[in-house]
Amino acid sequence: MNKPIVRKLRCAVYTRKSTEEGLEIEFNSLDAQREACEAYVSSQKAEGWLLVPDRYDDGGYSGGTLQRPALQRLLADIEAKRVDVVVVYKIDRLSRALMDFARLVEVFDRNSVTFVSVTQSFNTTTSMGRLTLNILLSFAQFERELTGERIRDKFAASRKKGMWMGGWAPLGYDVRDRKLVINAREAAHVRFIFERFDRLRSVTKLIPILAAEGIKTKSNKPVEKGYVYRIISNPVYVGEARHKGTCYPGEHKAIIDRPLWQRVQDILKVSPRKRAAHSRARTPALLKGVIFGPSGTAMTPSHTRRNGKLYRYYVAMDVLKRGAEPGPVSRIPAGDVERIVVDQLRAILRAPEIVLRTWRKARQKIDNLTETEVREAIEQLYPLWDELFPAEQARIVGLLVERVDVQEDAVEIRFRMDGLRSLVEDFNSGREAA
């Protein structure tokens, strides 16, 4: 008599541990879970269960989220029809959230995959099994939320005592025995940053100085503006521990004295945007937003005053932001490049084909518009340009210039011819109002 054919079921074992603590030992929690699951799969060999060779282990990932590398890889294999049974030690290893687990069960059902918990026997294909599963998940989610509340309360109480509660050590400190200890070399860099910012009152001006001094981040990367702002606004440097916006006396020693800290905070109270807006209002920049350096990096307007005289520049953003090595055109006089663009703009607008093209587009909106009127509108730009307010000059350049690329030996200008139509329409509106 022939033996009945047993369908082979490919079994994938999934393991998870919420923290990374203990993962470095030879036989850890993930190994213990996998051993129990593999033993269970072996016991079902007569039913056709076979263990797939791939390992799906998530060490140091919370059960409150589905964004786990091994779990995502498992779901991809399920969708690719490579898995028939998912085996876990307990259901909370797969998920601790009801909504997340509902999404997983939906994926399992869509691909005819069975879910098995070694220590909790139930079948997800029956209504009673689903009810049992939901009850167990409810308690798992309650336990997770309760544990989270206890951890948050303990963390808050520890911070109020000034204790260091883990994470990346800030520049100027090292972590020893779960406490912050001053790193002398880095602390000198922190003092330099505070003192220079107090003197310069500008992070933008400070970045190239830090690059020249060889000061880098704790991970040995170039210092950027955001990194400086995080340092000069971090109360850890005056010996305080911050938790949810409130500062408490810390267990660690301060690097910065209180008067210097307060001066820096007073400077930071003035919004950088307000200071930048004030500077822009006093120092107009015609090419802001359209000028780029040889590497394609945007250039931003900057200025300085010497002996009461204003000097304007366009500076490459990578020099300002990351303190990159200045190149031959990383900083150019604003007046020179603006003069080149305006002269080129005037020259191209005199071209008859440009006047003709503008007239053809503008007459679609303006009835009875003649080519002569278009030419007169364009020619009015020449004598009036120097009389216009900087804001109006910038508006016109924004209409007509799409991009300015500054090379070491040339300036390439890409014009926006459609903008001429708007200028002609403005001219026609002014003519009709008069």
Image (cartoon, grey):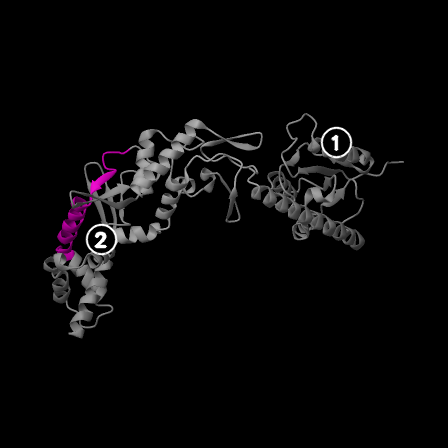
**x and y percentages locating residue 409 in the rendered image:** 19, 36
Left or right of 104 on screen, residue 235: left
Dominant secondary structure (helix, strand or loop) of the stretch shown in magenta: helix
Q: Which mark is residue 35?
A: 1
Disc 1 to disc 2: CB gap under 8 Å: no
The three-letter code of the residue at mark 1 reads Glu
Residue occupied by mark 2: 282
Residue 283 lies, with reference to residue 57, above or below; the image says: below
Which image quadrant is residue 87 in?
Answer: top right
Q: Nearer the viewer, mark 1 or mark 2?
A: 2
Which of 42/14 is in front?
14
Q: Amino acid at mark 2?
A: Arg
Locate residue 25: give its quadrant: top right
Q: Residue at x 42, y 31 (%)?
A: 187
| Residue pictured at 78% horizontal, 40% vertical | 118
Residue 328 in magenta stretch: yes
Closer to the N terminus: mark 1 or mark 2? 1
Q: Residue at x 36, y 36 (%)?
A: 193
Residue furthest to the left: 383
Q: Over which residues does the magenta segment extend?
A: 326-353
The answer, for residue 296, to whether it is visible in the render is: no
Q: Position of residue 334 (x, y in %)?
A: 20, 45
Q: CA distance from mark 1 to mark 2?
A: 72 Å
**Position of residue 148 in the picture relative to residue 414 (left or right):** right
SS at circle 1: helix
